[in-house]
Amino acid sequence: MVLPAEYAAMRNAKRDYNEAIQRVATAHGWDVIDFDAMLRERQAAGLVPPFPDLSAALAGGPVRFGPYFSLDGFHPSGPANRLIADSVIAIVNRKYGGTIPLVGP
């Protein structure tokens, strides 16, 4: 069971790491793929199942991860890795004029 303070620490650490990564990338002119934002946009469009709801775990209830996360609820699954790969390919093709085919579903 994840305690509220542990959840807050994980959430804040993720935010801080992402901000640091974005700063370095911006300083070097690199593109960054925000996987969380990408999945949230697709979720809002009804294209992916909901993210894990850790608030249920805090109340002792079940946590549902959907097919985009492995059974540990943290690591991306095969479909999520294909989504990540296609996002990277799209950026490479756009930025460098590549013609790499998308992996697809």
Image (cartoon, helix red, strand yellow):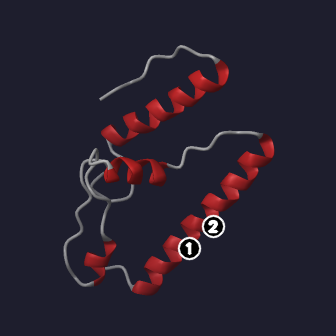
Give the residue drawn at x 33%, y 53%: 44
Q: Is residue 21 visible?
A: yes
Q: Going by the image, does 39 lie left or right of 47?
A: right
Question: Dividing the picture into quarters, in which one does residue 52 lie?
Answer: bottom left
User: Label 1 belongs to which residue?
Assistant: 12
**Relative to residue 75, is residue 16 depicted above or below?**
below
Res 65 label: none
Residue at 65% x, 61% y: name it.
19
Viewer can see residue 69: no
The residue that appears at 38% across and 58% down in the rendered structure is 74
From the top left corner, tell me how far across and down residue 8 is, in percent: 48, 79
Q: Position of residue 23 (x, y in %)?
A: 73, 55
The residue under label 2 is: 16
Look at label 2 and name its amino acid.
Answer: Asp
Callout 1–callout 2 Cβ contact below 8 Å: yes
Q: What SS does tag 1 mark? A: helix
